[in-house]
Amino acid sequence: MKLNVKDMDIATGGPLVAILNGKDAGKLDIHNMDRIKIKKGRKIETVALNITESSKTVPVGSIGVYEEVLDSLKLKNKDKVTINLTRKPLSIEFIKKKLDGKSLSKKEIDQIVWDIVHNKLSAPELTFFVAACYTNLVSISETIMLTRAMARHGDILNLDKYPVIDKHSIGGIPGNRTTMVLVPIIAASGLTIPKTSSRSITSPAGTADTMEVLAKVSFPIKKMKRIIAKTNGCIVWGGSLNLAPADDKIINVEKTLEIDAESQLLASIMAKKYSVSSTHILIDIPIGNGAKVKNKEEALKLKKDFEEIGKKLRKHVKVIITDGSQPIGNGIGPALEARDVLWLLSRDKRRPLDLEKKCVAMAYEIFKMVGIKEGKKKVLKILNSGRAYNKMKEIIRAQQGGIFNPEKIKIGKFKYDVAANKTGIVKRIDNRTISRIARIAGAPLNRGTGIYLYRHVGDKVKKNHKLFTIYSESRQKLEFAKEALKNTNGFVVK
């Protein structure tokens, strides 16, 4: 059947979808969510089909096409195309198999990942795969196959270097901006550390959001390689690269469902590390209230799995379990966290000492992994001599940035101080509450927005002394944040 293209001017965000009028669908006995092949010249694409009864939406004799299909086939409005019925993707049978709780083979996992990367699965089909992995046991063997498949169906950053260092924190802790301190320390030591980082999903800032205050973070892989050759390191947004692209599509589903399947977590992290040719990987698992990992038992299970997967992938993996019971650093939000980092690297007296202590310990672990002796002493020397700060400035320049001075970072002009309601000792700071208040105030979209902490757990406070300040770029959003404080400010003082 030949049809006229109607540009729907809608994007699905991934899956390839078209719409057919019900009368045309009836002629070919095509039903909702059947697959059809659309042919234009020599180009052919398989898409999932929606049916409409409205001639206003898609007239008889036309096919409504979403942006992803337009781009793939280079179509224009009113182009003529040919359609034919075709089978559903092979991986649907394999997804059903996993829903039944059965194990998948290498070939089956590879097919699923290929279909995800090439947008062959509809949104519900991809959701069923994520749900199947969440509700049913996924073996270490399957996780390793998934990791390899995710990395293989994407770009690989090949570096003619050894060792290649990488690190990852499981997350959930406000602040905790260790990457932006560790990268310049490690790079200044002469080691290579190509760091891809994420943007925020539920936190007030991701590493990519914070680095973007100082420099660009979106680069093609060739430019990333040039930055690394010049500086030994980088801090770039992984979403701008085609590294393990199936992972990003799976994460979007998990975010919507608010689930975090352990097998997907393991495969996601290790696939990204595999994609940048990392040889030595430090994994940080913070545990505590508000962290992704709640207790030591969970952390030890993850540690064992990470180390086993690392061994099978021939990677040196070291896992550390750290305190995630409260925010790390003082600034919470992109600009405030970037200022903390530059204060720390420039050895300013206002630097957050808890963040510094954690970064020194992590750098020491990395140096131990690669056989560098007296690692802690070397880390402190790199920091105190200014070499790490100079290296960070070098990376910022290479990433087309120009902010090196923390005083040049713009903070939201509207602010509100939150004070202790009694004298005592800070017994607890709720991570989720602090994150929520910062996000309500506008973080991370408004970079200068967030929270600056003056107290941490164990600190003594007097009544009416400041606990933290909320900063916002919007008077109205600051009012929303103040409203949220009526329930709790996140601090427990006794």
Image (cartoon, rainbow, N blue to C red):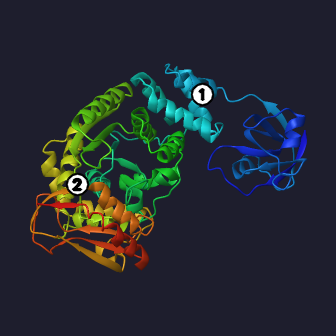
Q: Give left or right: position of 17 versus 181.
A: right
Frontmost of labels 2 and 1 is 2
The percent coordinates of residue 106 (x first, y second) are 52, 22
- Mark 2 residue type: Gln
419 sits to left or right of 195: left
- Placement of 249 over or under 451, stated as above or below: above
Q: Name the residue beneath numbered marker 2.
A: 326
Which part of the image, by quadrant, shows the N terminus?
top right
Residue 114 in sight in this render: yes
Task: Indicate which disc residue 111 carries.
Answer: 1
Image spot of residue 405 (x, y percent): 30, 73
- Give the percent coordinates (x, y) of residue 490: 25, 61
Which is nearer the N-term, disc 2 or disc 1? 1
Q: Visible in this render: residue 474?
A: no
Q: Say which element carries label 2.
A: loop
**Residue drawn where x is 44% and y is 37% of the image:** 271
Q: Quadrant of the C terminus?
A: bottom left
**Tag 2: Cα neighbours inside 10 Å, few (<14), some, or many (≥20)?**
many
**Residue 258 % position (x, y):** 45, 45
Q: Is residue 20 left or right of residue 328?
A: right
89 shown above or below 322: above
Distance from disc 2 to disc 1, alpha carbons, whole Å, reads 42 Å
Q: Provide the secondary structure element on which disc 1 rests.
A: helix
> Relative to residue 268, is residue 464 drawn left or right?
left
Above or below residue 159? Residue 149 is: above
Numbered mark located on residue 388 in the image: none
Q: Is residue 173 above or below residue 489?
A: above
**Residue under the point 42% across and 24% down:** 137
Q: Residue at x 35, y 79 (%)?
A: 414
Q: Dot 1 surroundings within 10 Å: few (below 14), some, or many (20 or more)?
A: some
What's the residue type where badge 1 is placed? Gln
